[in-house]
Image (spheres, rainbow, N blue to C red):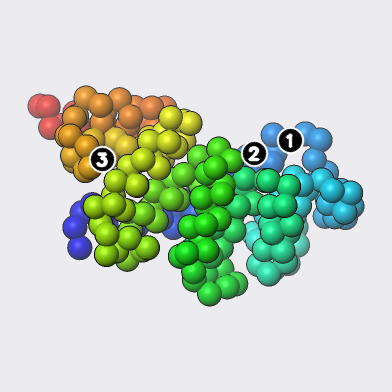
Amino acid sequence: MSEQQSVIIRTMRTIFFFTLFIFSCHLLANDKLPSTIPELEKAALDGDSKALVQLGYKYFTGDGVDKDVVKAREYYLEATKYGESYAFNNLCNIYLYGEGVEVDYVVAFQYCREGAKLGNPSSMVMLGEMTANENGLFKDKRDIGMDLSYQFYEMAAKREHPHGQYMLGYYYENGIVTEKDLKVAKDWYTKAAEQNHISAKQAINRLKQLNH
């Protein structure tokens, strides 16, 4: 397995939990959202789409309730009817990693694609990971898969997603899909590092050592 493939594969699970962390921060920023399960359930019954998504998150992670991935999926599915991008994104992760369901790359891709259409940068990153994965949907069309992965990472990076910025830097550093350009790579790594992306900080240090 090449270093490029190793980087892609070992980051996929990390992205899954990073997405959940970003999502939890997104929820906490919404001061109007109820905090208790009964209040959330009432709000959800009243058609509050964000309450549906938060209930899905709480049941998926076991935050304040017994973990129940099936119930989490039901809440996410209901939230997709309201166009909630994080519902699509989290359903993508559920099917990608087989959380309470059979692993299904096609369904995962479809959910993340819908999340990306709604402007969710985490969905764009996941699409980048899926299209770059040598064992994924494009395993027999590697050139197309890698081209798509670059496009998805670029979309996420331009929306200031730190891992999208890091991966774009990685592609420029190693000349994957695009021409090798260490200056551009450093610029993207720096943007990611400013958001406390650990691998991006390590990449910047690596580039500094190369210049010595």
Spatial separation of the CA atoms under disc 1 and disc 2: 7 Å
Q: How many marks?
A: 3
Quadrant of res 64 = bottom right
The secondary structure type at the circle numbered 2 is helix
Q: Are marks 1 and 2 in contact (CB under 8 Å)?
A: yes
Dot placed on the residue nearer the N-terminal end, 1 or 3? 1
Q: Residue at x 52, y 44 (%)?
A: 116
- Residue beneath the point at 43% across and 30% down: 158
Query: How crowded is the residue under tag 1: few (<14 C-alpha within 10 Å), some, or many (20+)?
Result: few
Residue 90 locus on image (x, y percent): 59, 54
Q: Is residue 29 above or below residue 176?
A: above
Q: Which mark is residue 171?
A: 3
The answer to whether any part of residue 130 appears in the image is yes
Q: Is residue 204 above or below residue 12?
A: above
- Name the residue: 64% across, 59% down: 61
Do the CB atoms of the residues marked 1 and 3 lie less than 8 Å apart?
A: no
- Residue 26 circle label: 2
Q: Is residue 163 above or below residue 9?
A: above
- For the question of whether residue 67 can be seen, the reply is no
Helix, strand or loop at disc 3? helix
Residue depth check, mark 1 versus mark 3: number of the one nearer the observer: 3
